[in-house]
Amino acid sequence: MKHKIFAGIFLIMCLFPIVGILIFGVAEPAANETLSSWPSLTNRDGSFNTDILDDFSDYISDRFALRQEMVTLQRSLTATVFHQSGESSVILGKDGWLFYMETLNDYEGINLMTEREVWAAARSLYLIQEYCESQGASFVFTIAPNKNSLYGEYMPDWYPASQTDGNAENLSAVIAEMNVNYVDLFSVFEAQDEILYRTLDSHWSQRGAALAGDTLLSALNVDFDPFFQEEYEVVQEEIGDLYEMLYPTGTELDTNQRYLRDFSFTYVNAIRSSEDNLIRTVNEGKSGSLLMFRDSFGNALHSFMAEGFGSACFSRITPYDLTMIASENADTVVIELVERNLDWLNSLAAVFPAPERNDINGDSLLTYLSNVTLSVSESDSLPGYMLIYGELSDDGLDYNSVIYIQTGEVMYEATPAGTGENPFSAYIPAEALDDTVSILYYRDGKLVCSQVISIS
């Protein structure tokens, strides 16, 4: 009899995940969590999916009924008893503070961008600024500091803070040498005694966003009424993104602020949330048109930036499409990028025509048999242009080398971004392309040329 009871209990436990889904529905992802999708019988090529049982098992493991409630309970116990986070993406700090694990490398100063990567990121920004100015638009770049870069005293003691410069410091130094317009938010926030980031979230608070907005608008010399010193009230209306990741069904609200002064701008179209990929605003009585490429820190920031412009477009779409300068009639372009994602500048090449560099003499150069991987495709964003991209494998390439693409008698500078080793990308007019191209770069201070590459 006992064996039958145990067998029955075991059977119920085995069936609960599936039966529970039928009764309570599937568990939904929390915050930035990604769960397994419903398995498919076939692969993309139409062949039978031989991993369907494993995929089904993953789906049930991720989405069984009451999963999020059970996860929240387990992690609450782990935090209370062991003072540890039960979620690999979240760091449990002091005094209840939460930090994003993706910022740990920056905090500890490990796995930082190489000297070449820092230079390449700065050069990409230089080329973006050059193109913006050629279109009659001013340009500014800014970095949203990681939370623990400002408030490291709340990090657990077993994570040692770096004592050397990190990606943000190294990049800001190089872009200063290139005369890229940069607004330093680190020093602005560090000068404030007040905590301007949210305790249970990875982002700045409304007060922090107001300070960032006032700082950027001041640097842009636009007409605006500062918000930071305006009266505000303390509110608890939202669950922080890190808290939701750690405790999927938790109900604790994070502290934030709400300004008593109303915003003067209006939305062109109704938005679903501040996370929309495209947000457009108008502001009667103001002049100028802003195009701002932003990430999640722009969720709170965009409202304050919209106060300074007659019209504004805020884009979360990557890579940055600079053809929007014309379509938005923008006279100002701003890029805001969080510190932890600065390496995006090396992997996501902005969309704009590659600049011609005909003052570079590519004739009579030493041909160096470097390993160049190259691809060519039509551009959807730039009609009439071809995207030439690839990587250059040469350990002798100077860390600060520009990469040129020569086709016929014309030389173009490529954006040093993409995938692979020493990547490059360039949008070149289709009519200007010859059947062959050559890649030029600096090696030991000398300009060298790769072998001729056929693209026909």
Image (tube, grey):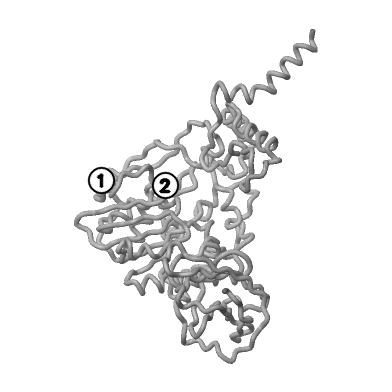
Q: Which of 323/117 is in front?
A: 323
Q: In what element is the residue under mark 1?
A: loop
Query: Does residue 333 lie above or below 356 as drawn?
Result: above
**Residue 250 seen in render:** yes
Q: Is residue 136 left or right of residue 248?
A: left
Residue reaching furthest to the top? 1
Q: Which of 444/189 is in front?
A: 444
Where residue 259 sits in the image (x, y, percent)?
A: 31, 44
Q: Which of 227/445 is in front?
A: 445
Residue that appears at 46% across and 76% down:
178
Kindly identify which numbered label has been placed on residue 188: none
Kindly identify which numbered label has been placed on residue 262: 1
- Mark 2 Cα shell of 10 Å, populated few (<14), some (14-19), many (≥20): some
| Residue type for callout 2 | Glu
Quadrant for residue 248, please give it: top right
Where residue 93 sits in the image (x, y, percent)?
A: 57, 44
Where residue 18 sits in the image (x, y, percent)?
A: 63, 25
Residue that appears at 71% across and 19% down:
11
